[in-house]
Amino acid sequence: MQSLSASADPAERPLIAQFRAATKRYGDVLAADALDFGIGSGEFLSFLGPSGCGKTTALRMLAGFETPTSGDIYLDGERVTEVPAYLRPVNMVFQHYALFPHLTVADNIGYGLMQRRPRPARAEVARKVDRALEMVRLSGFGPRRIWEMSGGQQQRVALARAIVNEPKILLLDEPLAALDRKLRREMQIELQTLQRQLGITFVLVTHDQEEALSMSDRICIMRAGRIVQSGSPNALYDHPINRYVADFVGKSNFLNGRLASLSGKNGQVETASGQRFTGRMHTELAQGTPVSLSIRPEQIGLAHMAQDGALPVTVINRIFLGEHTEYLVRHAVLGDLLVLVARQAEANEGSFAPGDAAHVHWAPQAALILPED
């Protein structure tokens, strides 16, 4: 199968799945609130949000494990709202893999194939299992028992079991949460590569923003059962529609105030202390509106000497992260700010220690004026 280009606009892809005003209630709890959007064929889409935001409910409605209280689910143009999970052209990889410990790796992968009626020939099952093992780079591991496999290998077995049935959509319910950081990063790369090779639509549920940003074609940011904003990782990071999205996608510093003046797509934010800062706007806001000025940590410069417009701060903490150093600094009025300094920039300027006096500065276009949530 050939995948669509990862850079293709989701709007240009034929739809493989649709939520049409899909709502799910559990008694008085509204878990999903009139979800209405489509998923493109061959797309890698992620639902991102905190616990209880509705992302897992959305995934389970797509899988057929939950039936919407109202609204509909469509797969490949067909209404499947009441169709049970085992009859839908989807497969799911769970967080804890749900592998059978008494079966071999090959038997785990081929289990779904053996449940089909009419049952395929064993030679055909073995051929498909071997191909799935090859795809996840576990060729020759078929005879092993599950308890003989590492966590990363078990994760690949779960993936192989899911793709062996050639689903139209692969659903991933926080499948990397149990892995250590290094292995998680390796598996992120493998998942992306596998998705491109297979051309299957991947839908991921995660609360890990780094995971969603690094893997997805498109991300749906969820809150209280609704999609607050959806878009490419770049679009969400650079153009969040409000403070909630900016705070959830990456790290950001916020200065609260009101929109004091407007000039085209730029404005000035006045804080409670009377200080004014220039920023840019992506949405129309009225003068006097309560707003937050968002500045990403990597957009802030940290210097020993004062520059025009720089703010005097005191270094509170320093964390070395390899390619970057993260500084927590404190301004007497504005409070704490997070600053991320690239290694080369720190080598040019010199490092700082807790207690040092310093100055922070940023370009006006680096600051984004956002409405409150």
Image (cartoon, rainbow, N blue to C red):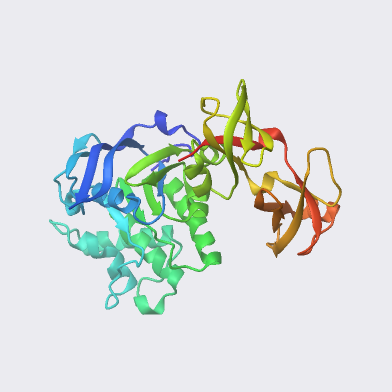
Q: Compared to 123, does 42 lie above or below?
A: above
Q: Position of residue 299 (x, y in %)?
A: 69, 44
Determine the residue positioned at 54% across, 28% down.
288
User: How many callouts does the rendering have?
Assistant: 0
Question: 365 and 273: which one is in front?
Answer: 273
Q: For the view shown, which residue lies furthest in the front direction?
A: 273
Left or right position of 357 against 83: right
Residue 343: x %, y % from top left:
76, 55
Image quarter of residue 115: bottom left
Q: Position of residue 340 (x, y in %)?
A: 69, 53
Viewer-proximal residue, 106 or 81? 81
Image quadrant for the N terminus? Answer: top left
Residue shown at 13% from the left, 56% from the top: 117
User: Residue at position x 43%, y 55% from top?
Assistant: 207
User: What residue do we see at 47% from left, 33% from top?
Assistant: 8
Residue 225 shows up from this direction = yes
Q: Position of residue 184 (x, y in %)?
A: 50, 63
Give the quadrant of residue 165: bottom left
Front residue of this view, candidates 314 and 135: 314
Of residues 372 and 270, the one drawn nearer to the viewer in this rendering? 270
Q: Quadrant of the C terminus?
A: top left
Asked whether, in this view, residue 105 is left or right of residue 87, the answer is right
Judged left or right of residue 179, residue 14 is: left
Q: Is residue 130 visible?
A: no
